[in-house]
Amino acid sequence: MLKRKIFMLHCCFFCLFGAPIFVTVPNQTQTRKIRLFAIFCPLLKRKTFLLFCCCFCLIGAPVFAAAPCRAQTVKIRLFEIFHPQSLEIYAAGRNVPANGSATHFTNTRRPQRISKTENAERLLICPLFDAAPSWVRIVLNNSTLQIQSANGSRSLPLTDTVKVSANGDYLFAAIPNPNDPKQKAKSERKMAGNSSVAARPYAGALQIYVDGDELCIINLTPLADYLAGVLAAEMPQAEFPALQAQAVVSRTYIIKNRQRHLQDGYQFCDLTHCQAYKGKAGVTPEIRQAVTSTADEILTFDEQPIEAYYSSTCGGMTADDAGVWSNVEDQPYLKSITDSAKHAEFCSSSPHYRWRARFSADSLHQVWQRRLGEQITSITVTKEGADSRVRELALMGNSLHLISGEDFRAVTCRVFGWNTLKSTWFDMQIEKRAYLFTGRGLGHGLGLCQYGAMEMARQGYSYREILRQYFPGAVIQKHLKNRED
Ligand SMILES: [Zn+2]
Ligand SMILES: [Zn+2]
């Protein structure tokens, strides 16, 4: 808005001062003919010019000024976890709620609700299909990329890219039969419990091409839509100030990490590796409001976007960035803080506030045996941080292996599930050929504690106060380089 105002002001100045000067200056160098014209019609000329300037102000300037405000498009890779071999896309019917949860159809071909409305909405496919169909299936065969729809089918070379958009607000995309062994999820991740997929609604367009032996499905969507989808997936139900705080943190993450998957040809994945994203599923008017009410706001330190980390539950004290990951530089706003006021810990209502986990020694040793390629006989904690998190473990096999706390947690969780070894804030004991873990919190514990933020919001804190609590020293600023609206 500010940019637009400055531009309008500039135009008005031009009209008032620039235009009369412009009209008089060329008189000195005019040819005879022009000079004659100027003698007879100086008034007319000036009036025409002024009229032109006014027209430019009223019509041209807003168009001109609007150009740099065009919504920024984000590229997100979808469904990578399922190793997709085919994809079904449906035009969204008007009776499918935008904020409703996605229609699950793990084993059915087409969701009933959508097929009823197939005349209402159409898909636009590039390269051009004969007519805009209401659904399309893209299948990766051995040597071709097949496009099938009610209008017929067509084969494309494997090097082609298909782009699908909807004439309505959004479309539905789904992986048919994700449990099909031909379309098996990547082994370790599948074991973590991700074995079903929903037909998810997406705003914007989908770009599909072959990447190795699977389909690469990219969602091209405006930043504001992506952000709303991230909020719905990362903090589905929360008080408004907590949603606003999450919006600022997630936006900062997007701005800071736009190059995260650049080498892969997109910007973000739809997993927690970047930020969880399930399209428009679960996006409520309140979430939209949290995005628009904080539009363009990001957290900065020294005028730069901060490393905006967040996790579910810190367990009573956030983590200190020193030593959590080797690639994270120490930041003054990511130091360990006590997550409490008046002796009450904000995230104590979280189901992950305190937890226990038990793994048989054999199963845990086997996980690391597969990883390290040698038999493991014992695991011990060797180093703890000032924030009480485990920083290093020693795994004894034929040789000694030192593993960082976060790596130990990540590898263990990939096999046993993300809700088992919930954080690195734990005590480990060995009992009857089993490892017993007693821990606090869920996630890495750096930055914003989501359960803590929700409790702060319940207690009446504003989103600015919540952000001050978890990122001390960081400042909220408007990031206007790529506007959202
Ligand atoms: Zn990612
Ligand atoms: Zn907390």
Image (cartoon, rainbow, N blue to C red):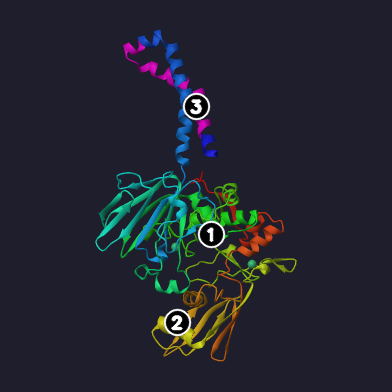
Residue at mark 2: 367
Rounded to the nearest angstrom, the CA distance separating label 3 from label 2 is 69 Å
> What residue type is disc 1 on?
Ala
Q: Is residue 189 left or right of residue 423?
A: left
> Can you tell which of label 3 and label 2 is closer to the viewer?
2
Relative horizontal placement of residue 363, taking residue 335 as reference (left or right): left
Q: Amino acid at mark 3?
A: Leu
Disc nearer the start of the sequence (2/1):
1
Hey, which residue is sitting farthest bottom in the picture? 432
User: Are dots 3 and 1 in contact, CB under 8 Å?
Assistant: no
Q: Nearer the viewer, mark 3 or mark 1?
A: 1
Identify the residue under disc 1: 233
* Identity, as a three-letter code, of the amino acid under mark 2: Val
Q: Quadrant of residue 199?
A: bottom left
Q: Which residues make up the magenta segment?
A: 7-35
Element at label 1: helix
Residue 298 position, x and y percent, is 55, 53
Q: Quadrant of the N terminus?
A: top right
Query: CA gap, disc 2 to disc 1?
Result: 30 Å
Residue picked out by circle 3: 58
Between disc 2 and disc 1, the foreground one is 1
Q: Is residue 395 above or below residue 39?
A: below
Measured along the vertical axis of the image, is residue 109 above or below residue 115? below
Q: In terms of secondary structure, where does tag 3 sit?
A: helix
Q: Which mark is residue 7?
A: none
Q: CA distance from mark 3 to mark 1?
A: 43 Å
Looking at the image, which is closer to me, 375 or 467? 375
| Contact? badges 3 and 2 (CB < 8 Å) | no
Q: Residue at x 54, y 35 (%)?
A: 5
How far across and how far down the image is residue 361, in percent?
51, 87
